[in-house]
Image: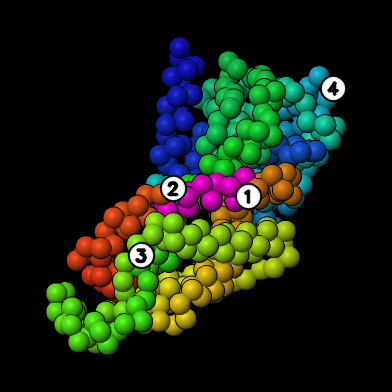
Amino acid sequence: MKRFLQTFWLAVFMGFSGTALAHAPNQSYIFLRINANSIEGRFEITSEDLNTALNLGLAYELTKADLAPHVQAIQRYYLERTSFSSERGDHNVLFGEVDNLPVLMGDSTANFIQIPFTLSNTEEVPEKLKIYYNLLFDKDPLHACMQVVEYNWKAGVYNEEANITLMFDPNTVEGTLDLTEDSIFTGFKAMIGSGMHHIFIGLDHILFLLALLLPSVVYRSSNRQEFLNTGQLNAVVFPAFLKPYAEVWEANESFKVSFIYVIKIVTFFTIAHSITLSLAALDLVRLPSALVESIIALSIALAALNNIYPLLEKGKEWIIAFLFGLFHGFGFASVLADIGLGSDYLTWSLLGFNIGVEIGQLIIVLIMFPVLFLLRKTKYYKPILIYGSIFLILVALN
């Protein structure tokens, strides 16, 4: 029970603290990345703990150059007190370049020494990975080590520093990481969820869809002069500068016609962002993130402006959806980059993420379109269309 409570409260602390505060004093870490044909990782430990263990005399503030004379001693210490094995035999630790990570903790900064490694004999990932860890426990009985799986595509884990799977302390120096429950289907489902999540939290994509959907249940009338002559504009108060454009909308009588318009718009948007998402994920095309974000904002403004002042001929709105959908694809690609995906299962990742995005878009359309269709003949719709578009322009350009 004590063991359970210790792990539980540690997980709660890390969950609320975020990535930068996932590190804590009196704790060391083993981060693992489970790839398709390899297992990589890194040890992390504070310079203060290394001083306790090895009397290195590391300064409170240090650089990689300060660490260089002590690298071999640190690596030797880890080789003596840690090991990895499985049903396939021993997995030797092959070290990479040691680095230093300053981490802010309250009013002070702790230096975590990062010691990257690759495990040998993991071209075929084992079902169960046995880990032995016995650092510092003889010098500091309060010390603990957290083993974290920060990446495992088949388990649906991406760039996650709070995914504690094992914990080591003076009473527990061995543990087994079970990898048998991981599957491509699990990772694929997680990517679908990630795509849906990004649509729902991606305000820019939602606003762009809204700008495109607002005119989906009306059409521009060719009888502008008739509307002016009958004085129908007097029923709704519009700013004087908008009156020349406000009267050109009439309600679509056919649900089918309106829905086909929506399908056409969403289809072209989907095709466009799928193209650039794939190109960016395959590292074939890259654009500066600042440029992409600016053009996405511009896309919202222009799509909304087209609802007030026709920039394109009737029936050509799909051009806006496709052209700017290309840049929204680069925006989606930045999400995959933030997740920390590698080349493993990239096809499944792109497919799952795209499906998730489309499901998210479909949910938004299914919520918004029926409401717009029901309101299209009411006196409220023109103000919604005009003022809603003005609002979108202001938000996009802010």
Q: Residue at x 80, y 38 (%)?
A: 37
**Res 82 visible:** yes
Name the residue that disc number 4 marks. Answer: 89
Mark 2 and mark 4: Cα distance apart in space: 49 Å
Q: Label 2: few (<14), some or many (≥20) within 10 Å?
A: few
Element marked by disc 4: strand
Number of the label disc, if any, that sits on residue 120: none
Element marked by disc 3: loop
Q: Amino acid at mark 2?
A: Ile
Sequence-first tag of 2 and 4: 4
Q: Residue at x 77, y 26 (%)?
A: 126
Q: Which residues are magenta?
A: 352-365
358, above or below 140, in the image: below
Q: Label 4: few (<14), some or many (≥20) within 10 Å?
A: few
Q: Amino acid at mark 3?
A: Asn
Sequence-first tag of 1 and 2: 1
Mark 4 and mark 3: Cα distance apart in space: 70 Å
Sequence-first tag of 4 and 3: 4
Name the residue that disc number 1 marks. Answer: 340
Sequence-first tag of 1 and 4: 4
Please identify, in this view, whether the residue under mark 1 or under mark 3 is nearer the observer.
3
Q: Residue at x 69, y 68 (%)?
A: 285
> Are the two marked residues, 2 and 3, in contact with CB atoms closer than 8 angstroms?
no
Mark 1 and mark 3: Cα distance apart in space: 46 Å
Mark 1 and mark 2: Cα distance apart in space: 27 Å
